[in-house]
Amino acid sequence: MDSYVVSLLDQMKEQYEQWEASSPLSSAELIRFFGAIGRAAEVIGRNDIAAEAERILQGMSRQKERQWTAEEALAEMVPLLRRCYEAEETDSPIASPPQRGGTEADVLLCGNDPLFFAYLRGSLQTVPWRFITLPSLEQAAASLFRLNPDCIIVDIGEDHLETPSFLALLENTGRPCYIPVVIVSRDGRKAVHLKWYELGADDVIVKPAAAGELFIRVRRLVEKKRKIDELVLIDELTGVYNRKYLPRVYARLRSDLERSGTPSCLALLDLDHFKQVNDRFGHLVGDAVLKKLAAFLLQHTRGMDTVVRFGGEEFVVWLAKTSTGEARRVLRRLQRQFASEEVEADGVRLSCTFSAGFVECDDPNEPLDHWLNLADKALYEAKRKGGNRVEEARRQTSHANGAQAEKQYRQADTQRWSVAIVDDDELARTVIADLVRKLAAEQEREVDIYEFGDGLSFLESPLCEHGRRFVVILDRVMPKMDGLEVLHRLRRRRMPHKVMMLTSRQDEREIAQALEKGVDEYVTKPFKWLELEARLRRLLKELDE
């Protein structure tokens, strides 16, 4: 890419950043911009870019009355960006767009070049990858465990080489599991690349980089990660996960519980009289029984459930989004079906049974070992009563109907913050929740975070039945009930909350409506993270007053 095209890209990036601060935009503004880009492209001899700009202008001339967001304007730029990044490599098969299909993957895009990321997303639409974009290295480092991407593409320059946020990101990619990191930069100096590799990068790509080449290099790293995960987390004998995978399962299910109050059930299974099988028929037959049970559990549980070989003849079955009554029915069904199965190995045919103890995981503050201990005690009770039984763990207190939900939303003490995030965008909820945890850690405070995908489920939750004070971060546009209506109902109930409204447009009428209905703060999307952090910090401080 010559320096003139680099200057053209810089001009487009600068204009996009201005649009972010002044959205919504008129069609006339965009027409002037794309017209200027076309004229500049002609001057530097890039008629292909000029022709693409003209095609965009023709489409906009039919939408003269339309208002545009900055993100919509960026989407219109994508064909121009393809010309800029790919023009010199159009004859290369590696630069051509990948075919539809392939392995699914979650890819985290991190950095401050929205044009390059928009180009990648637009060029890789046929690939079954889910892209997550975070402009802040600090946010990416803090969100890795929850997002758990298959690869991270970081767009940075030399000035970020050894910043604390970049080093923290690289450090977090190695725990609790391997996440490959690809550095993308304009800096082509070998010494800088070697330094990135030394710090932990898996690949370094110099811009301009065609999407087809980047796709192949990232796909290779994703496949490598999958192989490593299988070697580390899969039990060699049975082919199911080993116990090292349990913390990752619990992290995901605990996140569901924190966001929506949805419990799960952990069941610990143990083959009955397995030692006698080994003693009588030999270990080859014993191994066949273990493999049979593992395959049976995989076949007869749902895709959202997880089967883990805990050790020896014990297995964990984690039933996601499952209540106590449902778990009991599922485990009894599995017992009956497995008892009717036959295992054939080394000339021997036999049937086996298993016992199970289970517990409903309804408190996200409890560690994994707490639930394993309860399930183990219930399993011991099932074995003590003769085996081939299902027993539920005994709890310290009995729960009446609905008591579990009330426990989650219990009255907080004065040293604990409570924050409700109500937004239909799961990624927005994730990032905001991580920011809240960061602010709580700075103040050495405990924090309860509750997440809701729509306004109606928030208003109907037990959280709104108590007089506790909390911060509500409320999206303006949501399904079932919009943010203004939720705000109106909160104020009508005289709930003592601090409310921040998130809006995707800088519309003075919307802001005026929110202020009229009693909003305490508002922030426009896409977020300016420093602004969001400052306003949220103020609201949390007011909880203590």
Image: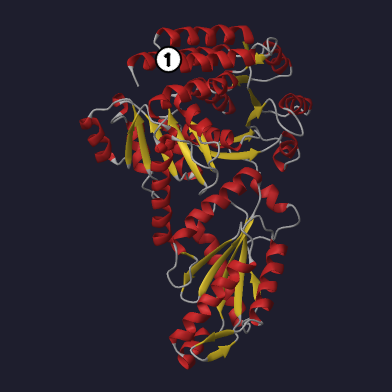
Q: Dot 1: what SS? A: loop
Q: Position of residue 284 (x, y in %)?
A: 45, 85
Quarter of the picture containing the C terminus is top right
* Location of mark 1 (residue): 46
**Coordinates of residue 459 in the picture (x, y in percent):** 74, 36
Location of residue 27 with respect to 305 vertically, above or below: above
Q: Nearer the viewer, residue 383 or 222?
A: 222
Which sits in the foreground, 339 or 270? 339
In percent of width and height, residue 283 lies at: 44, 85
266 vs 257: above or below = below
In the displayed structure, does residue 405 sit left or right of residue 315?
right
Q: Please, what is the three-letter code of the amino acid marked with disc 1? A: Arg
Dot 1 crowding, Cα within 10 Å, few <14, some 14–19, many 20+ = some
Q: Nearer the viewer, residue 494 or 279?
A: 279
> In terms of image quadrants, where is residue 332?
bottom right
Q: Is residue 435 something one can see in this rendering?
A: no
Residue 458 point in image, percent of width and height? 71, 37
Of 54 and 462, nearer the camera is 54
Farthest residue, direction left: 191
Residue at the spot 65% in from the left edge and 25% down from the top edge? 499
Type of colouring: secondary structure
